[in-house]
Image (spheres, rainbow, N blue to C red):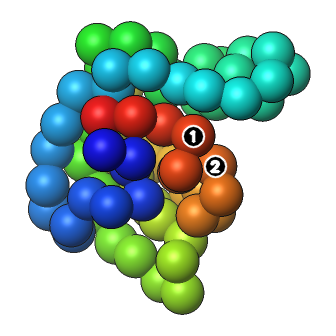
Amino acid sequence: MPLSMMNVGETKSVLHVSGRDKIRKFLESLGFVEGAEVTVVSRINGNLIVHIKETRVAIDGSMANRIIV
C-alpha cells in the first residue's frame, strides 16, 4: 500500500519507491530506501510528516503515493 494510506502512529517498512529516476533519487536522499522503517507522525491536508532514519521529513501526498510500504 502507498505511504499516503498509512494512519498516524503506524510504522511499516519501505518496500519500493516508484517514479522517474530524478524523483526516486530525491526520495532516496531523504532516507526512503527499501527496508527503512517509516512512521507517520502527523497528517495535515493530505501532506505527511514522517519519521524515517532518526529524522522527521515532510512530504506531500503525491510523493507519498510513490512510496510503497
The residue where tag 2 is placed is 63
Residue 40 left/right relative to 23 = left
Residue depicted at x 23% and y 27%: 13
Quarter of the rendering occupied by the N terminus: top left
Residue depicted at x 53% and y 50%: 65
Q: Secondary structure at mark 1?
A: loop
Rendered position, 22 above or below 43: above
The residue lying toward the viewer, choosing from 6 and 36, is: 6
Q: Position of residue 49 (x, y in %)?
A: 45, 61
Rendered position, 49 above or below 15: below
Q: Position of residue 42 (x, y in %)?
A: 34, 72
Kindly identify the amino acid type of the residue bearing the numbered disc 1: Arg
Decide: few, some or many residues near mark 2? Use Cα within 10 Å; few <14, some 14-19, many ≥20.
some
Residue 17 visible to an observer of this rendering: yes
Quarter of the rendering occupied by the C terminus: top left
Residue 31 left/right relative to 34 = right
Q: Position of residue 61 (x, y in %)?
A: 58, 64
Rendered position, 39 above or below 58: above
The residue where tag 1 is placed is 66
The residue lying toward the viewer, choosing from 1 and 48, is: 1
Kindly identify the amino acid type of the residue bearing the numbered disc 2: Met
Q: Quadrant of residue 27?
A: top right
Outermost residue to the right: 22
Outermost residue to the front: 1
Residue 37 visible to an observer of this rendering: no
- Asked if marks 1 and 2 touch (Cβ < 8 Å), the reply is yes
Give the distance between the C-alpha atoms of the residues marked 1 and 2, in whole angstroms. Answer: 5 Å
Q: Position of residue 26 (x, y in %)?
A: 74, 26
The label shown at residue 9 is none
Q: Secondary structure at mark 2?
A: helix
